[in-house]
Amino acid sequence: MNILLLGSGAREHALARALAHAPETTRLVVAPGNPGTASIATNIAVDPTCATSVVELARSMEADLVVVGPEAPLVAGVADAVREAGFPCFGPGKEAAQLEGSKAFAKEIMEAAQVPTAGAYVCTTMDQVEQALEDFGAPYVVKDDGLAAGKGVVVTEDRQEALDHASACLSKEHGAVLIEDYLDGPEISLFCVCDGTRVYPLAPAQDFKRHGENNTGPNTGGMGAYSPLTWAPEDIGQQVVEKVAQPVVDEMARRGTPFIGLLYCGLAMTSRGMKVVEFNVRFGDPETQAVLARLQSSLPELLLAAAEGKLDEVEPPAFSHQAAVDVVLAAPGYPANAITGGIITGIEEAEKVEGVHVLHAGTVRDDDDNLISAGGRVLSIVALGDCVTHARERAYEALNCIDLPGGYARRDIAAGR
Ligand code: GLY
């Protein structure tokens, strides 16, 4: 199978690794990729949000499958263009991608599909925002309606901070903001592979979104993750399919905008039952790094079956009983102002730790072939172990081998799980 994968983060390096290792894969091209994907696939410098260039590349490499990693190309309609050109594509079309592209649209779908979620007001003026904050009370949950690269959500006890974030969201063109009821309880990320009508759940994971230890500081794209969740109900996957993913997939099909791709269900296990916090329409980062480390069945076979609407023709995905822990190494200044350009060393040493592999995110090679930091989240250090504690010991042993001047990693990822 010739596979084209779009994207350049650690999530795409994890996807590339799982695709490249499968016997079905003949050729893997990543556009644009990163230095990590370059070592297992062919990187081609194509803008993944440019539908014309992506279709041209799919044609030139005679792709059997196109897998879209990040949300931006999906919201821009790249998956529609790829499918229209005749290539099977794992990723929803522009309309279905609105489940992530507009939080107000996601709420509309959840209401229509009777999916449990937090109550919310969609506000377009500051008067509405003030009233909604008054109605729900603290802690205040303020969400940008549109895509915001991980910076769209503020949860705070500070009313002024809530007002400031709402005002920043409303100042954008066609800006809208959601004020939501606060959901208590631990969060779970459950990825569902969808073929337009059917759904297969992957193994659950938990993400550590805050920058600081003990879940303090600003929200980030995610500072680490682990899987499985021994504290979650054993049938969590099935529960999420029945109560969340299948009703949403049915509603999208009913509207004539079928969901083909990865429905990321972000859930809170509240005192009032499981509720949806958010949907994303692509694999999550950094959870994918932990989930795919445990995948034992064929990823290309699964994604192709979904892309072709034939999920019933393949077995549900199978996972190792081992645990996986993923620790993100971030650049100094991340998330506000990431300082790039630091020389990274020690990856080879880190990968000598048993069960460990290191995935690249914001890295580039300079003219002297040094590995240089080039983004906020720089590396994901992923370790497998017999249990979460074992895996996290290995992940931190490996992290200690890596040097990035001023680099920062949380030291409490998966602690006590
Ligand atoms: N881990 C959060 C996200 O991928 O959006």
Image (cartoon, grey):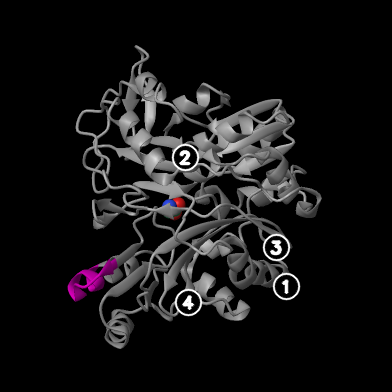
First in residue order: circle 1 vs circle 4: 1
The residue identified by callout 3 is 258
CA–CA distance in space, label 4 to label 3: 28 Å
Q: CA distance from mark 3 to mark 1?
A: 8 Å
Taking 402 as reference, is 67 above or below it? below
The response on whether ligand 1 sits within 8 Å of label 4 is no
Residue 159 included in the magenta stretch of the image: yes
| Mark 1 and mark 4: Cα distance apart in space | 27 Å
Mark seen at residue 386: 2
The quadrant in which residue 361 appears is top left
The N terminus lies in which quarter of the figure? top right
What is the C-alpha distance between the residues marked 2 and 4?
A: 30 Å
Please, is residue 159 above or below residue 358 in the view?
below
Q: Which amino acid, mark 4?
A: Gly
For discs 3 and 2, the disc positioned in front in the rendered view: 2
Q: Residues within 10 Å of mark 3 (few under 14, many from 20)?
A: many
Extent of the magenta region:
155-164
Q: Secondary structure at mark 4?
A: strand
User: Could you tell me which secondary element the residue under label 3 belongs to?
Assistant: loop
Q: Nearer the viewer, mark 1 or mark 4?
A: 4
Q: Which residue is mark 1?
A: 254
